[in-house]
Image (spheres, grey):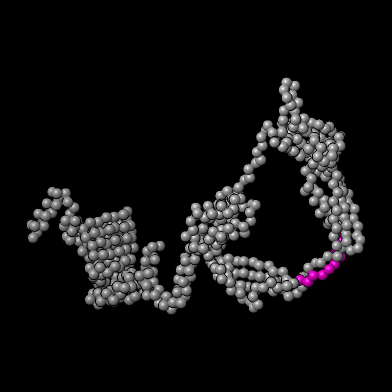
């Protein structure tokens, strides 16, 4: 492989040598340090061999002295390559410029992605990074990772750790969010379990404390279910932290009101596509009228960064904007079922247990739809009430 | 002159010095029957596919075989490739 590259760069000729005594020329070449190789003998008076193109004149001179005739059969690389480069000079210059630009652009960040975040959004993290000087177009060899980490963690206390890995213009921001500390309480400080809702008790599972109610009892909101004040036969009453689960049947009622006639978006004709290019932070629009928001239209924007994912990214982004016109029309929507479904989902989210049964009542009056949902639930109504220490 | 050369040769032999380095004697190294490196040659005397004759300081070396060719050649070294069947010193 290496040999072929050297041959292509230097230029190699394959020649045929004929004469009465062709060996003289071979000896003359060896004496004059003219490199020849791959000498073959098709017949008694003919030889074929290879030599570097640069030695052509010297070989001709030696052939004249040796009374031989040299005919060059093929030429590869060397001057032919140079001629090709001369003919397609602009192409080569352009290619070299692109390669140079590519090499230079890898020193800058052109694409950023955030990994490992759950609570914080990508935008929040990227905005803080931008405040700390790391943004698209930043010169990444000048970024001090330790300093950046300290600054970001100071500005985002929700993060426990972060780092920025740059690989050919693509910055991967890897974060680890802080796990919240659990609530720490003192065992000796007493607490009651009180009813958070009114209901009929169905089941009690007390782990700690004195149970004050029984299954089948009706309790009101705020009533103590399990007391943290424990009697002692041998000593004074002691305080404990009541723990347990009190399942009770409760009733919830929710109401919803919505206009019978609602505005809805109807797609209309006139869909347009606008294209823009972004070089670093500079944007070049290929459409008239600027980027101002068009009324009565939805705008969907897609960004395509030029590059190969995971290998490199160029500072060029193709932005495709789809403008989708719409008309707003008021129309009657039978939405009582949807409203009832939303109310049911709302109750389900709110209840710490299950919904046993439910019933919905709906109606319309004066352009409004009404829905009332009543649900019987089985849920844990025990809430912790800590004793206030003076 | 011949006496002087003989003396130098005898001295090199007594001192166990390589004669190819001291006196420029021909040295032949072969790799199997397909490749031969000839050092300190004095030129090609004849070149054919079946026979290559190489001049040495004293005498000549004749390679016989099939499809013989010169892979490379410089003023001192020579690489002969092909199916070498016999090597004769004449």
Return the x and y of residue A315 as percentages of the image width and height.
Answer: 54, 67
| Residue A100 to residue A238: above or below | below
Left or right: A305 in relation to A295: left
Residue A247 magenta-highlighted: no
Residue at the limit of the structure toward the top, as seen here: A234
Residue A17 in sight: no
Q: Give the range drawn in magenta.
A: A325-335
| Residue B69 to residue A79: above or below | above
Quadrant the C terminus of chain A occupies: top right
- Frontmost residue, A57 versus A361: A361
Left or right: A276 in relation to B15: right
Residue at position x 28%, y 64% in the image: B73
Return the x and y of residue B80 as percentages of the image width and height.
Answer: 30, 61
Residue A328 magenta-highlighted: yes
Return the x and y of residue A109 as percentages of the image width and height.
Answer: 52, 62
- Frontmost residue, A372 versus A19: A372
Residue at position x 81%, y 37% in the image: A223
């Amino acid at each position: 492989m290496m040999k072929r590259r050297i041959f292509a760069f230097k230029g190699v000729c394959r020649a045929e040598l004929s004469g009465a005594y062709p060996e003289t020329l071979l000896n003359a070449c060896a004496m004059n340090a003219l490199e020849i190789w791959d000498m073959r003998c098709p017949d008694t008076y003919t030889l074929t061999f290879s030599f570097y193109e640069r030695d052509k004149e010297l070989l001709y001179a030696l052939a004249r002295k040796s009374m031989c005739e040299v005919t060059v059969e093929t030429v590869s690389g060397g001057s032919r390559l140079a001629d090709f480069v001369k003919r397609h000079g602009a192409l080569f210059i352009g290619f070299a410029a692109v390669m140079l630009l590519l090499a230079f652009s890898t020193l800058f960040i052109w694409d950023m992605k955030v990994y490992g975040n759950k609570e914080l959004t990508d935008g929040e993290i990227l905005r803080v990074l931008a405040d700390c000087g790391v943004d698209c177009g930043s010169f990444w060899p000048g970024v001090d990772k330790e300093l950046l980490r300290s600054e970001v963690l100071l500005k985002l206390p929700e993060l426990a750790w972060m780092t920025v890995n740059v690989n050919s213009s693509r910055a991967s921001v890897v974060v680890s969010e802080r796990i919240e500390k659990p609530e720490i309480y003192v065992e000796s400080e007493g607490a009651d379990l009180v009813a958070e809702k009114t209901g009929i008790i169905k089941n009690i599972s007390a782990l700690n404390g004195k149970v004050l109610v029984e299954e089948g009892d009706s309790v009101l909101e705020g009533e103590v279910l399990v007391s943290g004040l424990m009697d002692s036969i041998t000593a004074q009453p002691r305080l404990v932290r009541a723990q347990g689960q009190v399942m009770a049947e409760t009733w919830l009622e929710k109401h919803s009101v919505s206009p019978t006639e609602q505005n809805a978006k109807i797609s209309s004709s006139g869909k347009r596509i606008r294209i823009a290019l972004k070089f670093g932070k500079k944007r070049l629009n290929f459409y008239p009228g600027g980027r101002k928001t068009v009324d009565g239209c939805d705008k969907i924007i897609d960004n395509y960064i030029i590059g190969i994912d995971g290998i490199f990214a160029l500072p060029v982004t193709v932005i495709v904007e789809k403008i989708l016109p719409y008309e707003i029309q008021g129309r009657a929507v039978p939405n009582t079922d949807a409203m009832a479904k939303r109310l049911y989902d709302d109750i389900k989210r709110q209840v710490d247990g299950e919904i046993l049964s439910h019933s919905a009542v709906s109606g319309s009056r004066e352009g409004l739809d009404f829905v009332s949902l009543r649900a019987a639930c089985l849920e844990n109504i025990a809430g912790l009430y800590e004793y206030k220490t003076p | 002159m011949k006496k002087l050369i003989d003396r130098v040769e005898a001295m090199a032999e007594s001192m166990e010095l390589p004669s190819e380095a001291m006196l420029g004697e021909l040295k032949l190294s072969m790799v199997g029957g397909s490749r031969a490196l000839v050092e300190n040659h004095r030129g090609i005397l004849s070149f054919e596919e079946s026979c290559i004759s190489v001049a040495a300081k004293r005498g000549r070396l004749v390679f016989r075989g099939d499809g013989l060719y010169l892979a490379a050649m410089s003023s001192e070294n020579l690489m002969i490739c092909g199916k070498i069947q016999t090597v004769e010193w004449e």
